[in-house]
């Protein structure tokens, strides 16, 4: 992505956070190629009064603290990739990611609250933060448990060349 | 006319009124909760998203489910509820005149009254704004989430505050297309996590734009958008059309203050909280000792804040009747104040926090 | 039909008893207990009244009983707020012209 285009895409003008804005926040931690399982990535950069991510995490990997407007900080080395925070986040601002999942493919698990749900094995189109089509992806599994409270979590693999760009999929 | 007596009458059964009634009943007062609608809950049951906050605020739980929990609590506490009951006026600072089922006039003498009448959506006008298809964002939300009817298939949202972006997201969930969200200000108003949700679903935002005109034969068929310069003037020649069948207006809310002011509560102008509100102290007591207020009528915020304020009003009203000890009151009040302060913390809360402080200061000064 | 039959959060639309309403002489199906405005919009009717001078069309605006833009003549009574009035079997609903007339 060109730097010029990125600079235009500011959260408060375009609606989506730009990679430049994300990289400027210390709280945004994209797991590198050394992880052998997906871990949570949090794109919460505004300090809204909220902490369900912290309370949902069973291993204490996410810390907000007593002042609930503090931005959540994740320790990806502790994160087990269970996905409870992904469903708990009211802002749908958390997903799981792994850069090298298999054969040049990255892995993502993101919240999805639309119908119809995709099915395992289905080919889908992955999108970036602005809804632009990035590449194709394959749905690995769709989890909808009572604990997730009607927020489905879609797991998919996609071309790792677009590891950081992809955050969700085109609605079906 | 029938005349009855109750400890506390709560007017309005939205998040604030419902919580006020529950807290007052839990504190030992006999509570009557009235609402003009056929169903309890006000606008809470169309909030199908997970709420922000902490566990104290039931964060991460959807508004509809919080509503169900509150209904069960009200039932367990034997809160008396009158639906289809319009509160028309308050006389002598304690008699509420109501009309039940559009037929029977009833006067209830209450030792304390809690006014939780909520707010109404603001409107903006432009040529064509009266066409069928132009409606409040809240109206569209009611149609899709309560009545399960799509008001349209291609929607233009006017206003990017939390209401505008949340309703846009819910329109997508209901199966509609949101063609665009326009915002007259140079920056978007809502939480970034909300705008990000609809943006990645492909919905474009137009900042420094507004709707110039709605066109259509008997119904909205198109909207004309126009760019605004830094002085908020329309830029000639920048117009373009968007094909839509529905235009939703999400340009803020105004407190529904008629009943409060009609009963003599002193007003205070608080533009950040929606305009004129009844002045009140931290315990949510108005300028009249027997009247408390809570929720959007005391300043427009969010449902989570309305619920905490409602609890404070219910607790204070009950305590003023001597149903709980001073110590119980102080302990619970501290907890509730902590909860409400947390929701007004941070960059998004600053304006509301300062505005509320100004109201409370004014209460102290003029008393 | 504009009914939302399935929804990711609210689930499938529950079965409901249907009632007949008569709208400007035409029979329409409504879900028992729903608001008149919802029933009309589900059936594709969006114009509820016409203004007194220029007979301009009006539909719902606030949807919660505050603005009175959606008023119609119902069972001969004018100015009924259709967004907060439930349908009943056999209800006669008419597009209202101006301030309407008692019938």
Image (spheres, coloured by chain):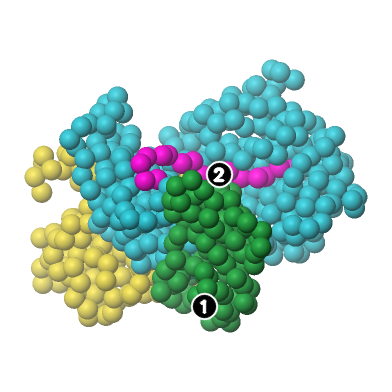
Chain colours: A yellow, B cyan, C green
SS assignment at label 1:
strand
Total number of numbered labels?
2
* Tags 2 and 1 on a common chain: no
Residue C50 spot, x, y in % from top left: 48, 54
Left or right placement of residue C38 versus residue A87 in this view: right
Quadrant containing the C terminus of chain B in the rendered view: top right
Residue A11 or residue A146, whichever sits in front = A11
Q: Which residue is mark 1?
A: C27
Can residue B317 be seen here? The reply is no
The numbered disc on residue C72 is none
Work out whether C35 lies above or below B293.
below
Residue C52 or residue B202, whichever sits in front = C52
Left or right placement of residue B137 versus residue B177 in this view: right
Closer to the observer: label 2 or label 1? 1
Q: Residue at x 46, y 77 (%)?
A: C12
Work out whether B54 lies above or below B170.
above
Residue A54 or residue C3, whichever sits in front = C3
Residue B178 spot, x, y in % from top left: 31, 57
Work out whether B28 lies above or below C87.
above
The verdict on residue B8 being magenta is no
Q: Which residue is mark 2?
A: B120
Which residues, given as a range, are shown in magenta? B114-129
Query: In whole angstroms, how far apart are the C-alphas of marks 2 and 1?
Result: 34 Å
Residue A32 sits in which quadrant?
bottom left
Q: Residue at x 16, y 61 (%)?
A: A133
Tell me which secondary structure the magenta stretch mostly adopts.
loop
SS assignment at label 2:
strand
Residue B217 or residue B235, whichever sits in front = B217
């Amino acid at each position: 992505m060109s730097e010029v285009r990125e600079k235009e895409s500011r959260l408060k003008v375009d609606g989506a956070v730009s990679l430049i804005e994300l990289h400027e926040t210390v709280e945004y931690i994209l797991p590198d190629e050394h992880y052998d399982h997906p871990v949570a990535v949090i794109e919460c950069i505004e300090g809204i009064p909220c902490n369900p991510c912290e309370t949902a995490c069973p291993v204490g990997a996410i810390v907000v603290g007593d002042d609930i407007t503090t931005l959540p900080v994740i320790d990806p080395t502790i994160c087990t990739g269970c996905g409870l925070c992904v469903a708990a986040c009211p802002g749908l601002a958390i997903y799981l990611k792994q850069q090298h999942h298999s054969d040049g493919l990255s892995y993502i698990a993101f919240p999805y609250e639309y119908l119809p749900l995709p099915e395992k094995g289905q080919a889908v189109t992955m999108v970036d933060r602005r809804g632009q089509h990035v590449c194709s992806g394959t749905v690995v599994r769709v989890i909808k448990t009572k604990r997730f409270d009607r927020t489905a979590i879609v797991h998919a693999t996609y071309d790792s060349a677009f590891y950081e760009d992809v955050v969700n999929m085109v609605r079906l | 006319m029938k005349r009855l007596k109750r400890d506390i009458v709560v007017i309005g059964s939205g998040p604030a009124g419902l919580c006020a009634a529950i807290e007052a009943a839990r504190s030992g007062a006999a509570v009557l909760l009235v609402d003009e609608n056929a169903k309890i809950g006000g606008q809470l049951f169309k909030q199908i998203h997970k709420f922000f906050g902490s566990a104290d605020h039931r964060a991460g739980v959807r508004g509809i489910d919080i509503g169900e929990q509150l209904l069960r609590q009200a039932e367990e506490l034997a809160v008396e509820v009158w639906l289809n009951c319009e509160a028309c006026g308050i006389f002598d600072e304690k008699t509420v005149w109501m009309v039940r089922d559009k037929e029977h006039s009833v006067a209830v003498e209450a030792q304390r009254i809690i006014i939780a009448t909520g707010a109404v959506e603001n409107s903006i006008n432009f040529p064509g704004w009266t066409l069928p298809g132009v409606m409040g964002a809240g109206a569209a939300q009611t149609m899709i989430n309560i009545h399960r009817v799509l008001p349209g298939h291609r929607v233009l949202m006017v206003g990017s505050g939390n209401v505008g972006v949340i309703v846009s997201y819910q329109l997508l969930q209901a199966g509609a297309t949101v063609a665009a969200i326009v915002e007259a200000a140079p920056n978007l108003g809502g939480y970034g996590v909300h705008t990000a949700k609809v943006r990645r679903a492909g919905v474009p935002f137009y900042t420094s734009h507004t709707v110039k005109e709605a066109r259509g034969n008997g119904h909205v068929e198109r909207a004309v958008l126009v760019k605004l310069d830094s002085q908020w003037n329309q830029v000639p020649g920048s117009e373009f059309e968007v094909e839509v069948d529905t235009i939703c207006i999400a340009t803020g809310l105004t407190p529904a203050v008629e009943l409060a002011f009609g009963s003599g509560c002193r007003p205070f102008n608080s533009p950040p909280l929606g305009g004129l509100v009844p002045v009140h102290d931290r315990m949510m007591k108005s300028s009249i000792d027997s009247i408390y207020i809570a929720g959007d009528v005391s300043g427009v915020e969010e449902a989570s804040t309305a619920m905490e304020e409602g609890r404070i009003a219910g607790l204070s009203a009950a305590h003023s009747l001597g149903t709980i000890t001073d110590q119980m009151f102080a302990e619970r009040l501290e907890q509730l104040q902590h909860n409400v302060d947390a929701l007004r913390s941070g960059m998004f809360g600053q304006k509301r926090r300062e505005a509320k402080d100004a109201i409370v200061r004014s209460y102290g000064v003029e008393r | 039909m504009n009914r939302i039959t399935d929804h990711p959060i609210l689930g499938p639309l529950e079965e409901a008893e249907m009632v007949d309403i008569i709208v400007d002489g035409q029979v329409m199906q409504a879900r028992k207990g729903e608001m008149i405005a919802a029933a009309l919009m589900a059936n594709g009717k969006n114009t509820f009244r016409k203004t007194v001078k220029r007979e301009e069309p009006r539909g719902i605006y606030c949807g919660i009983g505050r603005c009175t833009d959606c008023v119609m003549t119902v069972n001969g009574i004018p100015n009924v707020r259709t967004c907060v009035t439930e349908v009943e079997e056999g209800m006669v609903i008419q597009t209202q012209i101006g301030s309407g007339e008692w019938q």
